[in-house]
Image (cartoon, coloured by chain):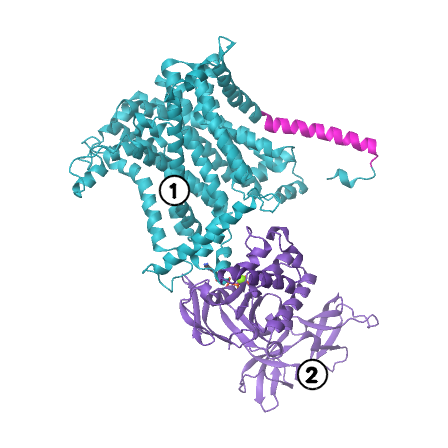
Chain colours: A cyan, B purple
Amino acid sequence: MALAKAPAVESGQLRSVIRSRSRSQAWTWVAMGGPLVLLLVFFLVYPVGQLLVLSITNDSAFTLAPYRQLFASSVYVDVLLITLKISLVTTLVCIVTGYPIAYLISVVGKERKATLLFWVLLSFWTSFLVRAFAWIVLLGRNGVINKLLISLGIISSPASLLYNFGSVLVGMVNALLPLAVLTMLSVMENIDRNLPRAAATLGARPGMAFWKIYFPLSLPGVAAAGIMVFVTAIGFFIVPALLGGRRETMITQLIIDQVQQTLNWGFAGAISVLLLLVVLIVFAAYDRLLGLSTMTGASAPRTAATSRLSSPIQKAGDALLTLLGVISDRIILLSPSRRRDRNPDQAGLGLQAFVWTMLIIISAPTLLMIPLSFGTGGLNWPPQGFTLHWYETVLHSPVWTQAFLRSLLVGLGTGALAMLIGTPAAFLLVRSNIPAKAAWLAFILSPIVVPRMIIAVGLFYVFASMGLVGSAFGLILGHTVVAVPYVVMTMMAVLRNYDTRLDHAAQSLGARPFATLRHITFPILGAGMFSSFLFAFATSFDELTIALFATGGLNATLPKQFWDEVTLQVSPVIAAVSTCLFIFMGLLIFVAERLRRRAGAR
Amino acid sequence: MTSSSLRVKGLTKRYGDFVALAPTSLDVAKGEFLTLLGPSGSGKTTLLSLIAGLAHPDEGQILVDDSDVTRSPAYDRDIGVVFQNYALFPHMTVEDNIAFPLKMRKIADADARRRTAEALETVRLPYVAKRYPRELSGGQQQRIALARCIVYRPAIILMDEPLGALDKKLRDQMQLEIKRIHRELRTTIIYVTHDQEEAMTMSDRICLMNAGAIEQLGSPEDLYFRPQSVFVADFLGESNLLSATVRQVDAQGLDIVLADQTAPSRAVGNGARFTAGEPIKLMVRPQNLHVGDAASGKLTGRLVDVMISGSMTRLYIAPEKADMPHLVAAYPTRSSAAPYEIGQLVSLGWNSADAVAIRDGRGH
Ligand SMILES: Nc1ncnc2c1ncn2[C@@H]1O[C@H](COP(=O)(O)OP(=O)(O)OP(=O)(O)O)[C@@H](O)[C@H]1O
Ligand SMILES: [Mg+2]
C-alpha cells in the first residue's frame, strides 16, 4: 500500500524494493505457517499415505489382494451398508430434533439462552465414553428404563433394550446432537430477527413466515450440521462397540480388529481407503449441491450466477415450502390451544416443552450416574445405601491415578502445542494476503474431515517405526493434529472481531511490532486464546481413538483406561470415574463461559 | 385508495421494571403524515412495533378505523412497515421480495407481476428486478423496501428511520420520493426520524417523544414557534433560553422581567396559561437575536467566538451576568459585514413578538 503511493521511486528501484520486501514477507509466512504445515504433512498426510501404500503392497510388491478380500464376500460390504444406515439415520434424527433446540436458543432472551446453552454445552463436553456408558446402565436389565416400564405396568419382565439398532441410535444421537445444535445455532444466530417480523407485517402467517423466510435462511446451518454429524458418525466406534450387538458392527470396528487382533495392516489399509472414499464422495456431493463454503456457516453468495441449484429444482423447492407453510398454518388454525393474543415475542409452549424434553434426555444419563456411584447395590436402579467405596478404589488404584495424570499432561501439552502452532497460522490466514487462502484453510481443516480412525491407525504405524508408541510426546503430536483445526478456527473468529486499528494506534504511539503484540494484542485476545486452549485441552482429554493404539498399560490415558475397563466389565467404579470426569468437565465449561463473558463485556 | 385512521389509547410497554413507553395516547387522521421525533431511546421504535403488532403492549388499545386490533397478529393488521435496516429477504430476488406480500394475499400471478413492475416503476428501479438485495446499493435497497411496502397498499405505513443510512443528497431525493408517494396514495404514514429538518419539511404533524412519553404533539410551526416545554425548545432547532418572571398577563401577551433585572419587557405566550409571579424561560431563536454595539439592547455581553458556517454567521456571546448561559446569535453571512472582534462588548436585543414564554421546568 505504501509502495503504491510512491510514484517518485524509479521503476527498477521499485521492483527491487518489491522483491526484497516480498522475500522477507515470504519468510514471515513460512515462519508463521510452516510449523503447522509440517505437522500436518508428517503426522496426517504421511501416515494416511502410508496406510494407502500398505493396502496395495505386499513385501514391496504391488498387490490388490486386500481389496479382493474386501469384496470377496458380502460381509464387509454389509458392514459398510450398516455403517451408512446408522450414520444416515443418526444424522436425520439429530437434524430434526436439533433444529427446534437451536431455534429456541437463538430466539429467547439472554438469560434463558445461557441456561439452555449450558445444558447443550455440558452434554457436548461430557466424554463420549461417559455418555455411552451411562446408556448401558440406563438401558440394562435392571436399569432405570426397565424399572420404570415395569412399575408402570407396561411390561412384566425386563425387556432387552441393549445391543440392538435402537440402543446404538440412542447413543449416537446423544453423542452427536450437541454438535448438530451448536452448528445450526451458529447460522441461526446470524439470521436477522426482523426478517420473519417483516414477513408478518407483509401478511405472512407464522407457518408461512417460517417456511418461506426463516427456514431457507437457516438451511446452510442444517447442511453444515448434517455433514458434520454424518462424517463424525461414520468414523465412530465407541457407541456401536458399547451399545450395539454383532449386527450393528460399524466399519471402524473392523479396522480396530484388523490392527489389534490380526495385525493385518494391508487389510486395515484397504478398509480405511474404503471409508475415506465414502467420506470424500459425501463431501463431493455436498459441494456439488451446496458449495463447501457453506461449511464454515457462512451462507453461500446467493446470486443467480452462482446458485448451483438449477431453476426447476428451485421452483419445486419453493412450491414445497409454500405447501409446508400452508399446511402448518392450517394446523395452527385447527389447534384448539391457539391463542389469538399470543405474544409475538414469546416462543410457543409446545416448542419449549419439546426442547426441554430433549435436553433432559441427553443430560439425564450422566446425571443418573451420580447417585449410582455412591450406591452399594451395584449399578441397579434405584440406588441403595451410601458408600464412598468406589471413589476410594479409584483413588487408591495407581492405574487410574496414573491415567489421570497422563491425560492431564497430554492435554496440557496438546493445548500448548496446538496454540503455539495454530495461533500464528490463524494470524496468517486473517491478517495477511497469502495466495490460495481457501486451499490452505481446507488443508488445515482436513483433520476434521478425515475419519479419526484412519489418522489413528496411520499414526500407530508411523509411530511404531519411530519408536514413539506409548510415549507421551507421540500422543501429544497426534492429539495436536486433531485439535489444531479447532484452535485455528476459534482464533480466526477471535481475530476477525479484533479491531486492528488498536494495533495501528499502538504503533503510531511508538510501539514496535513485538511490543504491540505483547502489550495490546495478546492482553485483548487473552480470553479468546484461553478458550481455544481449553478446547484443545478438552479434545485431547477426551480423545480415545488415537490413544487406543498409541498407549497401553501404565501409559494409558484416562479414556483408554476407561475403555479397557468398560469393555472388560461394567462396574460401579466406572460410575465413580464418570462422575469425576463429569464434574471436571462441568468446571471447565464454567470457567470457559466466565472467560467468554468477561471477554464479551469488554 | 385505502387509508385508515389510527387511534392509540393509553398504550404502555415495560421491559421488566423499565418503562419503554409510558401510557401514550395518539390520534392519527386518515391520510396524515405524522413524524415521531425524539432522542435515542425515547421509545419511538417501541411505539411503532406495538402499532405494527411486532411487540405486545402491557396495557392500552390500538384502534384502526375504530376497530380494536390490539390483540390481532401482525399479519392481520394491514399495517405496512419499512424497517430501519430494510429487512429485505436476502434469499429472494428483488422481484420476489416485492411480490411476497401479494403472494401472501393470494393475488393471481399475472396481476402480481403487473403490480410488482408498477411498484418498481414508482421507486424508479425497474432494471434491478432480477437482482438479489445484496447486489444493490444502500439507497436502492431502501427504495425496494419502500416498494415492497406500497405494493399491497396497506392502509397505514410505518417507517422507522428509513433514510438513516443514506447520504445527504440521496436522503433529499428520497424525501421527495416519499412525499410524492404519500401525495399519490394518500396513505396514512407514521414516520420516525432523528433529523429535525426532515421532520419539519415532511410532516403534517410532529410528535416529539422524550423518555417513553409524548412531550408535544402538533404542527411543525407549533413545535417551533410555540414549544410547550424547555425540552421541546431545546430539541427542535437552536434556542436561547433566558430565565425570567411573569409580571402580568393580558390578551396580547405577557409583561415579564428578566432575572436580575428590573426593567420590564414584553413576550408572547406559547398557548399555556401563565400566572403573575411565575418563573418562566424566555426563548429567543438565534436568528431573532439582534447584535448591536450601542447600549440600546436588553442585555450586554462579550463576544466569545465567531463562526461562519456557509450561509450563516454565528456569534457566541457570554452575558455580563456570570451565571447566565452563553447565547447564540445568527445572521446571514455577508462579505461586506463589519468584522467583529473577540472580546468586544456587544448589546443584545430582540422584538418582543419573537420572545416566547415557556413554563420553567420539564414537562407541563
Ligand atoms: N427488548 C428490549 N429489552 C429491554 N429494553 C428494551 C428493549 N427494546 C427496547 N428497550 C429499551 O426501551 C427504550 C426505548 O427503545 P426504542 O427502541 O423504542 O428507542 P428509539 O426511540 O427507537 O431509539 P433510537 O432513536 O435510538 O432508535 C430504550 O431505552 C431501550 O433500551
Ligand atoms: Mg429506534
- Residue at 37% of width from left, 16% of height from top? A260
Q: Amino acid at mark 2?
A: Asn
Q: Amino acid at mark 1?
A: Val
Say whether residue A335 is visible.
yes
Magenta stretch, residue numbers: A9-34
- Majority secondary structure in the magenta region: helix
Using the numbered discs, state the Cα–Cα distance from disc 2 to disc 1 in whole angstroms: 72 Å
Up/down of A543 relative to A348, above or below: above
Residue A31 counted in the magenta span? yes
Give residue A185's quadrant in the image.
top left
Of labels 2 and 1, the one closer to you:
1
Q: Looking at the picture, tell me which residue is in the foreground, B234 or A584.
A: A584
Q: Which residue is mark 2?
A: B351
Q: Looking at the picture, tell me which residue is in the foreground, B60 or B52.
A: B52
Up/down of A456 relative to A10, above or below: above
Q: Which residue is mark 1?
A: A120
- Residue at 24% of width from left, 37% of height from top? A371
Q: Looking at the picture, tell me which residue is in the foreground, A278 or A356.
A: A278
Residue A92 counted in the magenta span? no
Q: Quadrant of the N terminus of chain A?
A: top right
Res A29 label: none
- Please provide percent x and percent y for residue A561: 33, 23
Instruction: Report the side of B231 relative to A177 (left or right).
Output: right
Instruction: Report the side of A405 relative to A431 (left or right).
Output: left
> Label 1 crowding class (10 Å Cα cut-off): few <14, some 14-19, many 20+?
many
- Please provide percent x and percent y for residue B17: 41, 62
